[in-house]
Amino acid sequence: MPDQQLTARGEATRKRIVDVATREFAEHGIAGARIERVVAAARTNKAQLYAYFGSKERLFDAIFFASLERIVNVVPIDAGDLADWAVRLYDEYLQRPDLIRLATWARLERRPTGHLVENADRLDDAKLRAIAEAQAAGLIRAGDPFDLMALVIAMSMAWSPVSNVYAATADEPADVHDRRRELLRDSVRRAVSPA
């Protein structure tokens, strides 16, 4: 029983670190994040944090890759309805703006060009295969599946926390979100419909 209590406490500490560090990295980026703030808010110490993650960079990596996995799992692609997928991505950005901010910091501080992550194929294979199958079935336009996926994702981010024009929040009136969803849905349908 004591071992289970230690394990449960250790998991609780690890979860607190991840939760606090997610907010810290989303707000300040990799360079601006401070481990001192993370350990203070997580009610732990640097030794414990480093025992779990090894370094600040590895902590960011763990959080960032978990955020990518979350989006893939929570908002799985439906290549037969890319418009609905775009709307579901929009909704996920409203609920978890920190996830898109983490990706933006990774782009700004780590990989300014090319794929956002090394071995992007691991995350994109299923999506690209689904798009290619939808193309073969005549459901969506011909073209490079990666480019179509990138276009739909970019359209879904039009009002995201990293928009250069306007960053939406979940606090805005429901009818505003409904109008945006309808515009997004219609625009994606038009962009990807077969010729």
Image: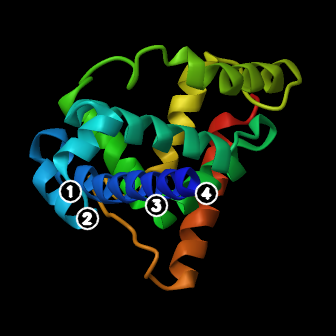
State the image quarter where residue 174 is shown.
bottom right
The image shows residue 14, relative to residue 183, as above or below, that is above
- As drawn, the label of residue 39 is 1
Q: Earlier in the sequence, mark 3 or mark 1?
A: 1
Look at discs 1 and 4 and give the one toward the viewer. 4
Residue at 43% over, 52% down: 10
Spatial CA distance of label 3 from label 1 is 22 Å
Spatial CA distance of label 1 from label 4 is 27 Å
Residue annotated with mark 4: 1
Residue 34 appears in the rendering: no
Q: Earlier in the sequence, mark 1 or mark 4?
A: 4
Q: Residue furthest front?
A: 2
Residue at 77% over, 44% down: 81
Residue annotated with mark 3: 96
Spatial CA distance of label 3 from label 2 is 24 Å
- As drawn, the label of residue 43 is 2
Say which amino acid is labelled 4: Met
Report helix, strand or loop for mark 1: helix
> Looking at the rendering, in which quadrant would you find the N terminus?
bottom right
The total of numbered circles placed on residues is 4
Q: Earlier in the sequence, mark 2 or mark 4?
A: 4
The image shows residue 180, relative to residue 191, as above or below, that is below
Q: Earlier in the sequence, mark 3 or mark 2?
A: 2
